[in-house]
Structures are given as structure tokens and as C-alpha cells.
DNA sequence: TAATGTTTAATTGTATACAACCAAATTTAT
DNA sequence: ATAAATTTGGTTGTATACAATTAAACATTA
């Protein structure tokens, strides 16, 4: 018997047998792989995620951004204030519902899309994985994410 | 033509077409799924990762922990100091090489393993995924991680 | 062996994450 | 209408992450 499956009780507590660690580490390393590409635009990775949503939707409330990114106001409020300071987005209360804050693109923020459009392909170039492999991994991660939300 | 593959230039900048976002979100949500289990032991998720390594190896230098977890001293030093304050680990210079700091388990830290040994199965119970699916995902993530390191 | 270079942690500063709490605006129930 | 409950962002405090810099210990070499 030379199984690679964990057998003893304590084997379940070994790092190498966890799902969580490669997920945690791969997420951080992939973010780090974006870093040199985003640095050229003075962007952080979570800010880039906000931009991807705003380039598509032009404006969204903080609540909508939070729902799509699974982030709460404790993270988004200071992040969006930094993006406002850089003149990339505007923050204003919704006149229809003063509780909501609408985040909109400024011309500067909109113009950043042209400089960012190469980032996805540049990043994929760093991964020696076929489109099919990447697509399969995305599908499985989306499935896992659905379990967790 | 009703392809689900991204076609237009801008489609590559949509959140839903990224690999990075489900990875980033699933990692955070999985960490959050651990939270109630770890709270009972007063542990954070990165501290739990350190413990998994120390339960297996009894003692490791900061450098070795950093290599295994892909974390640098800027993260580990304050984290390990907090673990030392809770009397879970000891921190001492290696007499053989005063540059290195050896992190060792205290009796309290060692005893924590008994209370943590149920965590992996409790967490897997939260995921409606078969062992084969989880194993496949771990394999793919490990492969991706290897590309990124 | 003295100067130079390398390794290892620690420190500093910035940016997330997120739980817990708070306040204002809105909605619901009476 | 008005008290109570809910929704929405903001704030506070703690804990990562990580780039950049520093300092001490060790290794190498001229």
C-alpha cells in the first residue's frame, strides 16, 4: 500500500493535504503577477477590479460594487476615497435615496481603460497553461465560490 | 454565433471573464468559512497555517516558514510575535547562526493540535463537493501555483 | 585579516480585509 | 402619522500582505 491519500488522523492537518493553502497562495501569487502591469497605471489589484466593473457599467453604488466583489464598506469606502483622490471616480449620494453612494467614472478613469486593455493578455502570457486548462480552472473556482456564498 | 468565449476587445476586461477574480474571491470566502471554526481556538487563518507547519515539524526558522507559506518577514515577524504573546510559540536566535530566528512550539501550542484535528473534516463538510472534485481542484491550483513561483 | 558581499530578520509605510459598531435615510407596521 | 425595523455607508480597531529599507551576522576574497 502506497496511497497518496491522507490516512492517519494528523495527515489531515498537514499543509500539503489542504485545499485552502494552494488557493490562498495562488491567489496572492497571481495578484503579485499583476503587480508590475498595474504599477504602470498606478493601480492596485482591488482598484483594478473596481475599474473592470465601472468600465462595463459606467456607474454603480457602493452596495452594488460590494455585492459583485464580495467586499464590504469597511474595505470599499477607503479604497474608493483613494480612487476619488486620484480623480478616477466620483462619489455622490443618490438623490433618489440618500443612503446610497453612486460611484461614477471620471473622464480620467474612463481613459484608463485604453491603457489597461492589454493587461489580460499580458498576464495570460505569464501562465504556461492552455486556454482549456484556464477555462476549466475558472469553472471549478466559480463552482467552489458558489458553495461559499 | 452565440459563443460564450470573450470576443470583443473589451470583453477581456470584464470581471466574469477573468481567472483572477474567482481565485481572489474564493480564497477570501474559504478563509471566511474557516473563521467560525478557528474562532473557537482564538486563531486567525494565517496563524493556523503556521501551526500546521509547526505541528508537523516542531520547529522551523522564520526563513523556512516564509519559504513554505510564501510570506516574507514583514508579514511573519508581527504575526509570530502575536503568537508568542499568546504563549503558543517561542522565538529564539539560532546559536549556530545568530541571523536566524527559530520558531518552536510551546506545550500550549502543541496541545492545540488536539482541538484543531477536527477542523479539516468540519470544513469539508461545508463544501458540497466530492473528494474527487476537491482533489482535482487542489491539483490544478498546485499546478497554477508552480507557474507563479 | 580586512574589506566586500550576502543572508536573515526587523522595521516602516501603504493598502487591503473584515468584524463590530454607529448614524442617517428609508420603509414598514400600527 | 409615527414608532419600530431595515438598509446603507462610514468609522474604528485588529490583522494581514508586501515593497523598500536597515542592521546585524556570516561568508568570501583579495
Image (cartoon, coloured by chain):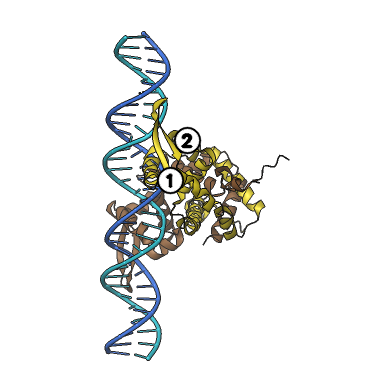
Chain colours: A yellow, B brown, C blue, D cyan
Residue B143, given in percent of the width and then of the height, sits at: 58, 57
Residue A83, given in percent of the width and then of the height, sits at: 40, 45
Residue carrying label 1: A88
Residue A38, given in percent of the width and then of the height, sits at: 47, 55
Tag 1, which chain? A
In the structure shown, which secondary structural element does the residue marked by tag 1 occupy?
A: loop
Q: Residues within 10 Å of mark 2 (few under 14, many from 20)?
A: some
Question: What residue occupies the far front of the structure in this picture?
Answer: A107
Q: Which numbered mark, 1 or 2, is in the foreground of this view?
A: 1
Question: With A128 as the anchor, is A96 left or right in this view?
Answer: left
Q: Is residue A5 visible?
A: no
Q: Confirm or deny contact between disc 1 and disc 2 (CB under 8 A).
A: no
Question: With C18 as the anchor, is A58 left or right in this view?
Answer: right
The residue drawn where x is 61% and y is 60% is A128
Q: Are marks 1 and 2 on the same chain?
A: yes
Label tally: 2
Residue A26, given in percent of the width and then of the height, sits at: 51, 54
The residue drawn where x is 47% and y is 42% is B29
Tag 2, which chain? A
User: From the viewer's perspective, is residue B1 above or below residue A5?
Assistant: above
Residue carrying label 2: A60
User: From the viewer's perspective, is residue B2 above or below residue B106?
Assistant: above
Q: Is residue B115 visible?
A: yes
Of the 4 image quadrants, the one containing the N terminus of chain B is: top right
User: From the viewer's perspective, is residue A60 above or below residue A38?
Assistant: above
Foreground residue, B23 or A69? Answer: A69
Question: With B91 as the anchor, is A50 left or right in this view?
Answer: right
**In which quadrant of the rendered view does residue B97 lie?**
bottom left
Question: With D13 as the anchor, is A78 left or right in this view?
Answer: right
Which mark, residue A57? Answer: none
Amino acid at each position: 500500500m502506497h496511497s497518496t491519500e491522507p490516512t492517519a488522523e494528523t495527515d489531515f492537518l498537514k499543509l500539503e493535504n489542504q485545499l485552502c493553502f494552494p488557493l490562498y497562495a495562488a491567489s496572492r501569487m497571481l495578484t503579485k503577477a499583476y503587480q508590475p502591469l498595474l504599477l504602470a497605471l498606478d493601480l492596485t489589484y482591488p482598484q483594478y477590479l473596481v475599474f473592470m466593473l465601472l468600465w462595463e457599467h459606467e456607474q454603480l453604488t457602493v452596495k452594488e460594487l460590494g455585492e459583485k466583489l464580495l467586499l464590504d464598506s469597511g474595505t470599499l469606502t477607503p479604497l474608493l476615497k483613494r480612487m476619488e483622490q486620484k480623480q478616477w471616480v466620483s462619489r455622490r449620494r443618490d438623490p433618489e435615496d440618500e443612503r446610497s453612494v453612486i460611484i461614477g467614472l471620471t473622464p480620467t478613469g474612463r481613459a484608463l481603460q485604453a491603457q489597461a486593455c492589454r493587461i489580460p493578455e499580458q498576464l495570460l502570457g505569464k501562465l504556461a497553461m492552455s486556454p482549456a486548462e484556464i477555462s476549466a480552472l475558472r469553472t471549478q473556482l466559480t463552482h467552489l465560490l458558489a458553495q461559499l456564498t
